[in-house]
Image: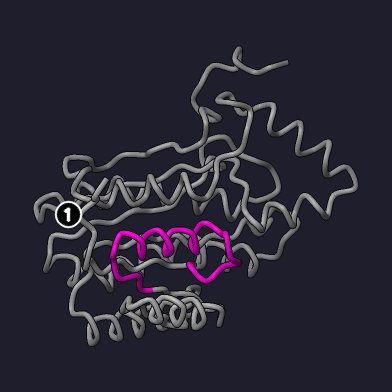
């Protein structure tokens, strides 16, 4: 399907993760659709990702930015404004499940909020004039943790809950400009970071099996490719009348009846 994203300027935060991460997969899918990915992340891997895409004839950019610092986010937006002058879609993707719970310091908790939620507001605020120019749209990457809880990760859970609140607030705020605001809900996705976490556990294989059995559809994890496909469809004009929605890409993990569990 041609999603009509060719030539569109799409800003993606947190997209310089390990190869195969959700953000990196999104930028690769954008490139395949002929869009122009703008990577905003602190990790220097982004330079290599942008260069790889440029070698394929895509005008991709990497803006190295500490997303926990809103002054750096503002500076990044000015770079985007100078080079492109517009933003057709903003995908707020950055997120670290950092385990900032009751045992963490207040500084750790506040940092979690700044990285995982405040960055979404700041990136949207500073890109908004460019989004308004072209009636672009906003897509926030959320997590089932905001809806189900997890334990031991108050900062991340609060941030993701706040992101859902912001998604609906912005849908209302920006409807007069024809700007859409939606969120993706992710549950268990097989990413390199997830793989690394499983390998740190003494009973990793058993833990993985127990998680997978609880995913109703096909008893398997969601792939980053499936998430990227949903993201691209949602920011495209194929979803032109969808706003204020929380779209779960999770094999039914969050919303389906528990009777579907295999045991």
Q: Residue 196 versus residue 73: which sits nearer the camera? A: 196
Examine the rendering and report whether any part of residue 100 can be seen: no
Q: Residue 166 versus residue 218: which sits nearer the camera? A: 218
Q: Quadrant of the C terminus?
A: top right
Q: Is residue 126 left or right of residue 201?
A: left
Task: Residue 53: give x, y in percent of width and height.
Answer: 41, 75
Residue 209 highlighted magenta (yes or no): no
Examine the rendering and report whether any part of residue 95 can be seen: yes
Task: Residue 43: give x, y in percent of width and height.
Answer: 56, 78
User: As displayed, is residue 111 above or below residue 213?
Assistant: below
Q: Find the residue positioned furthest to the top.
A: 259
Q: Find the residue positioned furthest to the right.
A: 202
State the residue position of label 1.
179
Could you classify mark 1 by the number of other residues whose Cα lies within 10 Å: few (under 14), some (14-19), or many (20 or more)?
A: many
Q: Quadrant of the N terminus?
A: top left
Task: Residue 66: give x, y in percent of width and height.
Answer: 50, 79
Report the magenta residues as a range: 15-38
């Amino acid at each position: 399907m041609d999603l009509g994203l060719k030539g569109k300027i799409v800003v993606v935060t947190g997209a310089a993760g390990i190869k195969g991460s959700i953000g990196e997969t999104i930028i690769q899918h954008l490139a395949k659709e002929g869009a122009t990915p703008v990577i905003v992340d602190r990790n220097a891997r982004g330079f290599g990702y942008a260069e790889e895409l440029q070698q394929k004839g895509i005008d991709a950019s990497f803006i190295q930015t500490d997303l926990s610092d809103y002054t750096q986010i503002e500076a990044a937006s000015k770079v985007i404004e100078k080079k492109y002058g517009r933003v057709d879609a903003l995908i707020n993707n950055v997120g670290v499940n950092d385990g900032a719970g009751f045992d963490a310091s207040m500084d750790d908790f506040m940092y979690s909020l700044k990285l995982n939620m405040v960055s979404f507001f700041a990136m949207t605020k500073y890109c908004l004039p460019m989004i308004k120019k072209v009636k672009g749209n906003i897509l926030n990457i959320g997590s089932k943790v905001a809806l189900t809880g997890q334990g031991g990760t108050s900062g991340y859970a609060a941030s993701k809950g706040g992101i859902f609140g912001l998604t609906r607030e912005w849908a209302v705020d920006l409807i007069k400009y024809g700007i859409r605001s939606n969120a993706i809900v992710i549950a268990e996705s097989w990413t390199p970071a997830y793989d690394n976490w499983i390998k740190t556990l003494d009973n990793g294989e058993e833990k993985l099996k127990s998680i997978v059995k609880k995913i109703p559809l096909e008893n398997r994890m969601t792939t980053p490719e499936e998430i990227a496909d949903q993201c691209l469809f949602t920011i495209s004009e194929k979803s032109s009348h969808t706003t204020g929605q929380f779209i779960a890409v999770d094999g039914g993990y969050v919303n389906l009846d528990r009777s579907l569990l295999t045991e």
